[in-house]
Image (cartoon, helix red, strand yellow):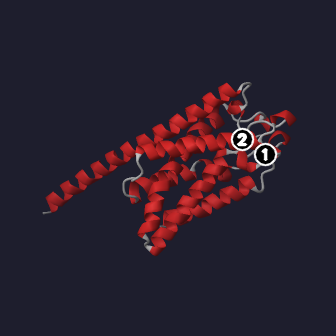
């Protein structure tokens, strides 16, 4: 419960400092802060944390079930955000932003929106949650659905004919076919992350259960 509550507050801090106090450059300003996958994923993750806190507070089986079903999508999204952002941020900033020299984001905000969500979701999953109950087909459906929705959201928000640019430099390609390839790759990585995390859970829990059984045997 405490990890959910702490994550909500850290996430809200990151959302406020990044989405309210940070002024976007002219080529991004018109589309606003909701064009960034980081911000959308953060808001989703905050909802997961808040739901988890309320579920623990009330002991509601229904809320726990809902959280168990929406948590995997949040973790898959945050793995994408962290997995794409940090390598580009550290080594290839020009693929992240069109103006690397003016890239300004405080360390506290950076960690709050690009690292805390994935770490908190992963710890919550491996330590405090039961196995995911969502099926592979359902997870794939939601990954595809969210990818398509994000595509159309950007098409609606980003007015390239009037000088606007896509939120990330690696998305700012000449042809839509190239951009589709980027979105498909991201969706595939997100689904692969879901499958991998499910395997990791089975491995971690299996090792833990075997270790606990050995200790119990020795104590007896």
- Asked if residue 188 is positioned above or below residue 205 in the image, the reply reads above
Q: Point out the residue furthest to the left here.
A: 220
- Asked if residue 86 is positioned above or below residue 123 in the image, the reply reads above
Is residue 127 visible in the rendered image? The answer is yes
Q: Would you say 159 lies left or right of 50 here?
A: right
- Chain-order first, disc 2 or disc 1: 1
The residue positioned 75% from the left and 43% from the top of the image is 156
> How far across and how far down the image is residue 48, in percent?
54, 59
The tag on residue 42 is none
**Alpha-carbon distance for marks 2 and 1?**
8 Å
C-beta proximity under 8 Å, tags 2 and 1 = yes
- Nearest to the observer: residue 75 or residue 176: 176
> How far across and how far down the image is residue 203, in percent?
32, 45
- Asked if residue 96 is positioned above or below residue 22 in the image, the reply reads above
The residue positioned 83% from the left and 42% from the top of the image is 25
Is residue 79 visible in the rendered image? The answer is no
Please give the residue where the numbered disc 2 appears in the rendered image.
154
How dense is the environment of label 1, judged by Cα within 10 Å: few (below 14), some, or many (20 and up)?
A: many
Q: Would you say 210 lies left or right of 12 here?
A: left
- The quadrant of the rendering that contains the C terminus is bottom left
> How far across and how far down the image is residue 93, in percent?
69, 33
The residue positioned 64% from the left and 50% from the top of the image is 40
Quarter assignment of residue 153:
top right
Quarter assignment of residue 149:
top right
The residue positioned 69% from the left and 45% from the top of the image is 36
Q: Secondary structure at mark 2?
A: helix
Q: Would you say 118 lies left or right of 64 here?
A: right
Q: Would you say 215 lies left or right of 39 here?
A: left
Please give the residue where the numbered disc 1 appears in the rendered image.
31
> How far across and how far down the image is residue 14, in percent?
66, 56
């Amino acid at each position: 419960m405490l990890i959910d509550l702490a994550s909500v507050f850290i996430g809200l801090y990151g959302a406020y400092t990044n989405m309210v106090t940070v002024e976007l450059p002219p080529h991004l300003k018109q589309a606003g802060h909701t064009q960034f996958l980081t911000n959308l994923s953060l808001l989703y993750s905050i909802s997961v944390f808040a739901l988890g806190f309320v579920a623990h507070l009330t002991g509601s089986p229904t809320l726990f079930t809902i959280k168990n079903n929406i948590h995997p999508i949040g973790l898959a999204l945050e793995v994408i955000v962290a997995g794409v952002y940090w390598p580009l941020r550290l080594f290839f900033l020009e693929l992240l932003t069109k103006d690397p020299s003016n890239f300004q984001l405080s360390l506290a905000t950076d960690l709050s929106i690009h690292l805390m969500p994935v770490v908190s979701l992963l710890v919550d999953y491996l330590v405090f949650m039961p196995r995911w109950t969502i099926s592979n087909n359902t997870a794939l459906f939601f990954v595809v659905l969210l990818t398509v929705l994000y595509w159309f959201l950007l098409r609606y928000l980003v007015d390239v004919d009037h000088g606007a640019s896509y939120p990330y430099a690696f998305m700012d390609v000449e042809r839509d076919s190239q951009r589709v390839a980027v979105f498909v790759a991201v969706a595939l990585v997100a689904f692969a992350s879901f499958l991998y995390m499910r395997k990791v859970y089975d491995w971690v829990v299996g090792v833990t259960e075997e270790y606990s059984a050995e200790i119990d045997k020795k104590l007896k």
